C-alpha cells in the first residue's frame, strides 16, 4: 500500500555529498544514514509513481470494460427481441401446420371412397406435413433454449455492469471528497496568510493538490540559505495552519533562476542552492509546528522549472505542495476488487 506521495527531480545524494565535503563536520556514519534515507525516499517515490500509473490504467480499463458491457447488453437485447419474433412466427406456422394436418386427415378420412391415386397423394402430403411439423417443433425448441441462454447472459452482463458502476461511483465519491477537503484546506491557509497578501505569496489548487508559492525574496536574502524573520513568520503561519491535518503529504521545493552561481562562492550550482533552501524551510516547519517529519519532503529543482521566462525573480521561489494521503483510496479499490 502506498505510504508517500512525493516528487524527486534531483539526486539528493550528490547534493548532500557536496555539502558534507564542504563542511567536513559530519561523520561517515551520518553520511551513510543520510544516503540510506535518500534511497528510501527514492524507493517510496518510485512505488507511488507506479501505483499512481496503475490506478490511472485501471480506471481507464474499468471505463473501457463498462463501455464493452453496455454494447454487449444492447446486442443481447436486440438478439432477444429477434428471437422473440422468431418464436412467435414459428408458433403461428406451427398452428397453421396443425390446421393443414387436420384438414388433410379429414380429406383422407372422407376420401376413402375416392380413387387409389387420390388417396395415395393425400397420404403422401400428410406424411410430408407431419415431417415439416416435427422439424418446426425441433426448431422452436432450439430457439426457446437459445432464448433462455441469451436471457441468462443478459442477466449476468447486467450484474457485472452494476458492479462496475458501483466501483466507479465509489471512486468518483472519493475524488469529490478529496477535492472538497483540499478546497477547505486552501481556505484555511488563505486565512492564515491573509495579512501577507501582496508580499509575494500565491495559492493555487490544481490536479488535486494545493500549491503555496513564495518568492525567494520574501524568505531569503540574495544568495543566502538563512531565512529572514519575515520569511520565517510566513512559514510558521503556514505550518500552524496545516499541522492538524494528519492525512497530508507535504513537499517543499526550492527553485532558482538560470543565472550561474559565481565561481568560488558558497554553492557549487543552482541545484545545491535550491536544495539547501528547501531544507531550511522544512526545518522551520518542523521546529515550529506539530507536523510529523515523516510527512515532509525537501526537494531541490534548481533552474529547470521556471514559471516566467521574462521575469527571473518569479522563478526564484519556494513551493510548498500539499496533497492528500491516497492510502484510503487504494484500500477502497482493494476492497471493491473481485476475488
Image (cartoon, helix red, strand yellow):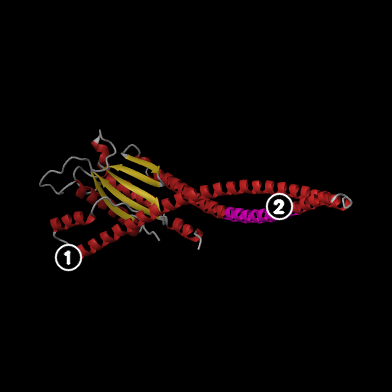
Note whether residue 271 is visible.
yes
Mark 1: secondary structure: helix
Q: Residue 65 carries which label?
A: none
Q: Which residue is drawn at 44% across and 57% down?
A: 330
Circle 1 sits on which residue?
A: 28
Percent across and percent down for residue 207 are: 40, 45
Q: Main secondary structure of the magenta part?
A: helix
Note whether residue 98 is visible.
no
Query: Residues in magenta?
Result: 130-159
Circle 2 sits on which residue?
A: 136
Mark 2: secondary structure: helix
Q: How far is mark 1 from mark 2, CA to CA?
A: 92 Å
- The vertical placement of 63 against 313, above or below, is below
Q: Which residue is drawn at 15% across and 61% down?
A: 25
- The vertical placement of 150 against 204, above or below, is below
Percent across and percent down for residue 75 are: 58, 47
Q: Dot 1 surroundings within 10 Å: few (below 14), some, or many (20 or more)? A: few
Q: In this view, does 36 lie to the left or right of 49?
A: left
Q: Residue furthest top?
A: 310
Q: For residue 325, which quarter of the picture? A: bottom left
Quadrant placement of the N terminus = bottom left
Q: Residue at x 59, y 53 (%)?
A: 158
Q: Which of 154 and 237 is in front in this view?
A: 154
Q: Which of 253 and 88 is in front in this view?
A: 88
Tag 1 and tag 2, C-beta contact below 8 Å: no
Percent across and percent down for residue 41 are: 30, 58
Amino acid at each position: 500500500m502506498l505510504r508517500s506521495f512525493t516528487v524527486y527531480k534531483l539526486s539528493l545524494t550528490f547534493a548532500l555529498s557536496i555539502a558534507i565535503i564542504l563542511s567536513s563536520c559530519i561523520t561517515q556514519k551520518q553520511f551513510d544514514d543520510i544516503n540510506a534515507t535518500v534511497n528510501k525516499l527514492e524507493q517510496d517515490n518510485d512505488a507511488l509513481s507506479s501505483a499512481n500509473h496503475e490506478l490511472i490504467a485501471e480506471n481507464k480499463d474499468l471505463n473501457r470494460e463498462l463501455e464493452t458491457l453496455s454494447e454487449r447488453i444492447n446486442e443481447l437485447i436486440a438478439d432477444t427481441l429477434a428471437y422473440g419474433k422468431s418464436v412467435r412466427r414459428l408458433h403461428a406456422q406451427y398452428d397453421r401446420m396443425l390446421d393443414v394436418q387436420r384438414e388433410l386427415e379429414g380429406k383422407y378420412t372422407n376420401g376413402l371412397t375416392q380413387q387409389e391415386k387420390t388417396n395415395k397423394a393425400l397420404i403422401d402430403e400428410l406424411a410430408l406435413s407431419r415431417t415439416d411439423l416435427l422439424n418446426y417443433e425441433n426448431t422452436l425448441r432450439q430457439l426457446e433454449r437459445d432464448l433462455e441462454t441469451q436471457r441468462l447472459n443478459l442477466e449476468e452482463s447486467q450484474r457485472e455492469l452494476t458492479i462496475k458502476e458501483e466501483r466507479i461511483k465509489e471512486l468518483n465519491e472519493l475524488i469529490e471528497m478529496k477535492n472538497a477537503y483540499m478546497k477547505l484546506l486552501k481556505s484555511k491557509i488563505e486565512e492564515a496568510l491573509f495579512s501577507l497578501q501582496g508580499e509575494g505569496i500565491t495559492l493555487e489548487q490544481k490536479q488535486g493538490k494545493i500549491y503555496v508559492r513564495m518568492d525567494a525574496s520574501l524568505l531569503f536574502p540574495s544568495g543566502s540559505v538563512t531565512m529572514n524573520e519575515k520569511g520565517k513568520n510566513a512559514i510558521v503561519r503556514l505550518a500552524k495552519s496545516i499541522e492538524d491535518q494528519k492525512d497530508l503529504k507535504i513537499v517543499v521545493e526550492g527553485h532558482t533562476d538560470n543565472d550561474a552561481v559565481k565561481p568560488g562562492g558558497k554553492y557549487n550550482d543552482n541545484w545545491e542552492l535550491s536544495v539547501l533552501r528547501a531544507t531550511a524551510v522544512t526545518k522551520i516547519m518542523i521546529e515550529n509546528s506539530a507536523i510529523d517529519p515523516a510527512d515532509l519532503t525537501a526537494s531541490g529543482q534548481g533552474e529547470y522549472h521556471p514559471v516566467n521566462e521574462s521575469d527571473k525573480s518569479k522563478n526564484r521561489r519556494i513551493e510548498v505542495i500539499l496533497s492528500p494521503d491516497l492510502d484510503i483510496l487504494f484500500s477502497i479499490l482493494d476492497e471493491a476488487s473481485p476475488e
